[in-house]
Image (spheres, helix red, strand yellow):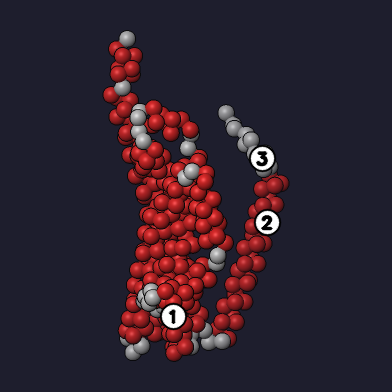
Amino acid sequence: MSTTSVLFDAPGPRSKRRVLIGSVIAGLLLLGVLVLVGLRLDAQHQFDVEKWAPLFDPSDEQFPLVWQRIGEALGNTLVAAALAMVFSLVIGTLLAVTRVTAARWYRWAVVGLVELLRGVPVVIAIFFASRVLPQFGLDLEPLWFLVIGLTAYNSVIIAEIVRAGIDSLPKGQREAAESLGLRRGQVLSLVLLPQAFRVMLPAVISQLVVVLKDTSLGFVISYEELVRVAGQIVQVLSNPIQVYLLIAVIFTLINYTLSRFAIWVERRLSQGKKSATATLSATDPAGAGTGGG
């Protein structure tokens, strides 16, 4: 039996022919653009070995120093990103719980703080931390100013994500937990928050990817992260296309790894949920009674 899509009709022979012709034309146009770009780059000697050797040829005399600087910058980037991610998750979760459980007379303060930090650009938060905090005696390393700025912005975003996850859960979850005698804190920590994180995990991981990419804003406070060090390498080697292409590939690989990790965690959580459901079904007295009848 053939099934018909409820969103659109299946294309006929003429529509398929039009789609095929359009795809071929678009592919040829894209290929032509790539050829033109390649020719322009070749005319500017961007494919010369001298521009790529310091990055990919171990026999080049500048190769060890270049990769030493990239390795140090990558380490600085990952450290800043990891610290900002951890602090953003912890503080964001606390803000979400506070906003959900706050009484009306002081909820406005939590909401005001969240809306204020959401409206501030990340680069301003980083610059503000590096210029204002030393006035109060907090003379920190650039790493911590970057982490504070990233945490200030991303924690409120994560707080809104977690709050949306909690609000999306059926009200029966809270009512069932309260009927068992659980206190409000236990209801949140044992019942609502685990489900909210499971529901909003893709959005949380997407925000963590943003945290990683925003470490590149550390240049405003002279933090030695990947993009800043790449600029220093370009000043010496005069090959911006090659260097920034390599940096883009590094960021892409890290973000892809983070995304795959999120998929793995989501699958493990789903498997754990299915296993728990199967165990409860097997030990349910009502189910056993029904099977015996």
Which label was assigned to residue 8?
3
Badge 1 marks a residue whose secondary structure is loop
Question: Quick one: label 2, few (<14), some, or many (20+) residues within 10 Å?
Answer: few
Instruction: Tell me the CA gap for discs 3 and 1.
Output: 54 Å
Question: Quick one: label 1, few (<14), some, or many (20+) residues within 10 Å?
Answer: few
Above or below, 289 against 59 in this view is above
124 left or right of 82 in image: right
Read off the residue under disc 2. Answer: 21
x, y percentage for residue 248? 47, 71
117 left or right of 97 in image: right
| Kind of residue at badge 3 | Phe
Which marked residue is nearer to the observer: mark 3 or mark 2? 3
Read off the residue under disc 1. Answer: 222
Badge 2 marks a residue whose secondary structure is helix
Location of the C terminus by quadrant is top left
Which label was assigned to residue 19?
none
Residue 75 visible, this angle: yes
Which marked residue is nearer to the observer: mark 1 or mark 2? 1
x, y percentage for residue 168? 50, 40
At horizontal 34% and vertical 14% (from top left) the residue drawn is 290
In-front residue for pair 11/69: 69
Q: How many marks?
A: 3
At horizontal 50% and vertical 82% (from top left) the residue drawn is 240
Location of the N terminus by quadrant is top right
- Mark found first going from the N terminus, 3 or 2: 3
x, y percentage for residue 191? 38, 38
| Kind of residue at badge 1 | Ser
In-front residue for pair 173/229: 173
Q: Residue 5 lies in what quarter of the image?
A: top right
